[in-house]
Image (cartoon, grey):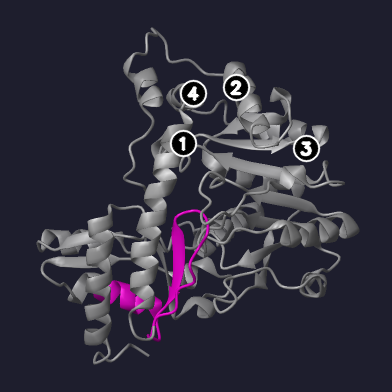
Amino acid sequence: MPSISTKGRLMPASPIRKLVPFAEAAKLRGTKVIHLNIGQPDIASPEVALNAIRNLDRTVIEYSHSAGYESYRKGLVSYYAEHDIHINHEQIIITNGGSEALLFGMMACFEPGDELIIPEPFYANYNSFALAAGVKVVPLPTTIEDGFALPPISTFRSLITPRTKGILICNPGNPTGRIYGAEELQRLRDIVKEHDLFLFADEVYREFCYDGAKHISCMTLEGIDQQVVLIDSVSKRYSMCGARVGAFITRNAELYDAVLKFAQARLSPPTFGQIASEAALNTPKSYFEAVTAEYVQRRDILVNGLNGIPGVICPKPNGAFYCVAQLPIADSDYFCQWLLESFQLDGYTVMMAPATGFYAQPESGKKQVRLAYVLEKDLLQRAVVVLKEALKAYSGVAERP
């Protein structure tokens, strides 16, 4: 029998989805599973986007331009201008979600074996995209005690080698909810300019900033216009994860042309997704005001509740809709599986993502989990109670070695 490729064998399973079989088995036993493992909001998508699909009057579902419909890209120019990001439509390539934008960018910017510095914990699929592109992830450690703030510039410099070609940040952060401020971004700008690196900025959560925090786009940083790559997506902004529409944005014409060739090879981004996403540009500001207020309430219920459980540490995030919690356990993979297999309270259990998958070295996340506060408030309150009682019961369970 032919053997599977090295990439196929090394590709990591998603920490967000790998426990799905255990959740499905729990449901078959009659247990209700509270899904805090995945960033799938229960917030309704904008009505203007839904109506664009409901009222679609086409006889052919055709390919679009490989860069995406021009009308949508021109609409995005106006959207970005409202966020102080000034570009033109020929600097935007519409992609199959932000994931494809990241993968295309890595393949276009880096040679196999090049190094990419990423503050950790980081979005788990960065590991997968880097492996697919042959890129080596170099983790930049941050700590839960410091709220996952970026370390001093000297720490960045200590990681740079002749193979270092880029830095990737997620701002606001997944999984931490951290928003990088002006001083932190200035540090990034300086190191990127000094060492002539690419700066990948995953900014898909820019709408979700809390407690007076302001989002600053890397596209506004001076002196590195040709080095910044903006990654975007409609998935979380409009609660349209299934649309699978993202964007790759650069002012670097040579890089744009390279990525466009990858886009041409996959023909075009989704037609239905683009139609809905273009319509979503007309979403009223009141939609975001209501959604942001809802997420603040959900965050406070979950994070305050977690911090009220003995032995739990959970910094309060000021962006996105995730938090990382450190639990009084030795193995988060085992604990999360045990919750689904062996524990329920009043018919409920909780599904979380072990944080091992959000680190370059899984051992760093052995005591941590990521939770997404994307469900209605009463379910979050119930999840806190379930988790508190589960930790009490788990203290008497012998963890696997």
Q: Are marks 2 and 1 in contact (CB under 8 Å)?
A: no
**Numbered mark located on residue 282 in the image:** 4
Residue 222 position, x and y percent, is 84, 46
Q: Secondary structure at mark 4?
A: loop
Give amino acid for label 3. Leu
Q: Are marks 4 and 2 in contact (CB under 8 Å)?
A: no
Nearest to N terminus: mark 3 or mark 1? 1
Give amino acid for label 1. Arg
**Numbered mark located on residue 389 in the image:** none
Q: Secondary structure at mark 1?
A: loop
Give amino acid for label 2. Gly
In front: 76, or 157? Answer: 76
Q: Secondary structure at mark 3?
A: helix
Question: What is the C-alpha distance between the residues marked 3 and 2?
Answer: 22 Å
Q: Is residue 274 above or below residue 386?
A: above
Give amino acid for label 4. Asn
**Numbered mark located on residue 75 in the image:** 2
Residue that label 1 marks: 244
